[in-house]
Image (cartoon, grey):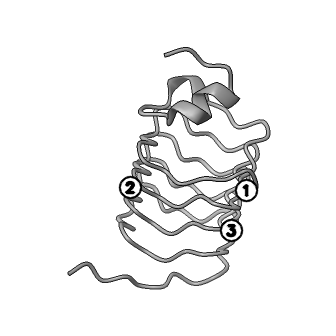
């Protein structure tokens, strides 16, 4: 059985979580603005409503993560794995970089960004 743990709800913008293992963590509404999550394992992580603005998610594995209502404005998701993510119309993708190099983008998200197959 997978256990979830709760991450604190606010971290400083310079937080270094690169290559952290946060699989199945509950990070709902956590302020991760500007955090370095490069190469982090975030499989099935609950990031609903999280503030990831200006964050670095390059090479992060977000497979199955819940990004509903999350703010990814100006985040870097280059070469991130996004297969099976859950997102909605309230998920903010403004000025996100690296979308064209991310892996396993859901087809509906590819369509929103005008990316081919």
Query: Which quadrant of the rendered structure holds the N terminus?
Result: bottom left
Crowd class of label 1 (few under 14; some 14 to 19; many from 20; radius 10 Å): many
Give how far apart the Cα atoms at labels 2 and 1 are: 21 Å
Q: Secondary structure at mark 1?
A: loop
| Mark count | 3
Q: Which mark is residue 49?
A: 3
Q: Label 3 near label 2: C-beta < 8 Å?
A: no
Give how far apart the Cα atoms at labels 2 and 3 are: 22 Å
Q: Which mark is residue 71?
A: 1
Left or right position of 63 against 52: left
Which numbered disc flags the more N-terminal residue, 3 or 1?
Answer: 3
Q: Residue at x 41, y 42 (%)?
A: 83
Q: Which mark is residue 90?
A: none
32 or 6, which is in the foreground?
6
Which numbered disc flags the more N-terminal residue, 2 or 1?
Answer: 2
Q: Label 1 near label 2: C-beta < 8 Å?
A: no
Q: Which residue is mark 2?
A: 19
Give how far apart the Cα atoms at labels 3 and 1 are: 7 Å
The mark closer to the camera, 2 or 1, is 1
**Residue 98, position as x, y percentages in the image:** 60, 29
- Quarter of the image for residue 18 reads bottom left
């Amino acid at each position: 059985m997978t256990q979830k743990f709760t991450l604190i709800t606010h971290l400083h913008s310079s937080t270094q979580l690169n290559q952290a293992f946060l699989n199945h963590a509950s990070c709902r509404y956590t302020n991760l603005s500007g955090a370095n999550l490069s190469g982090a394992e975030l499989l099935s992580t609950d990031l609903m409503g999280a503030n990831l603005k200006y964050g670095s998610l390059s090479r992060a594995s977000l497979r199955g993560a819940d990004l509903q209502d999350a703010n990814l404005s100006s985040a870097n998701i280059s070469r991130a794995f996004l297969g099976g993510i859950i997102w909605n119309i309230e998920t903010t993708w403004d000025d996100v970089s690296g979308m064209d190099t991310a892996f396993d983008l859901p087809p509906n998200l590819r369509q929103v960004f005008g990316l081919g197959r």
